[in-house]
Image (cartoon, helix red, strand yellow):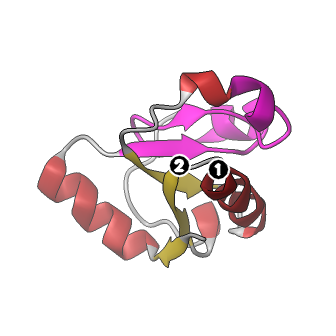
Amino acid sequence: MYEEITPQAVERLIEGKGEVSIIDVREPWEFAKGHIPGAKNISVNELLSRLDEIDKTKDHIIVCHSGNRSGVASAILSAHGYTVKNMAGGMLEWNGQVVC
């Protein structure tokens, strides 16, 4: 299983730690329109074929547009032994910095 985390809590983590592993599971064209600085883009559709790109020793925050796809991705990653948190509300609720 996985936990949920609010966008505000993610922002505090980034401010406090600096380096936080964020995986954005939106499509590349969505990611290109704006994403959280430092996020890695792995579309939920490519997730299983790209598991080797995700460090199993780290905790990861999973992000999408509204929180639905990231919930699916969080369930998949959790089932494969990854420690993840789904960012509730996705980028719709994100008020922090965005880069294109």
38 to the left or right of 77: left
Instruction: Specify whether residue 88 is in view.
Output: yes
Q: Is residue 66 above or below residue 24?
A: below
71 to the left or right of 19: right
Which residue is tagged 2? 82
Image quadrant in which you'd find residue 78: bottom right
Which residue is tagged 1? 77
Q: Residues within 10 Å of mark 1 (few under 14, many from 20)?
A: many
> Which quadrant: the C terminus?
top right
List the single residue furthest toward the right: 45
Label of residue 21 in the image:
none
Q: Residue at x 36, y 64 (%)?
A: 10
Q: Magenta part of the protein: which range? A: 21-50
Tag 2 secondary structure: loop
Q: Residue at x 57, y 23 (%)?
A: 53
Instruction: Specify whether residue 29 is in view.
Output: no
Tag 2 or tag 1, which sits nearer the N-term?
1
Do the residues bearing badges 1 and 2 touch, measured as CB atoms within 8 Å?
Answer: yes
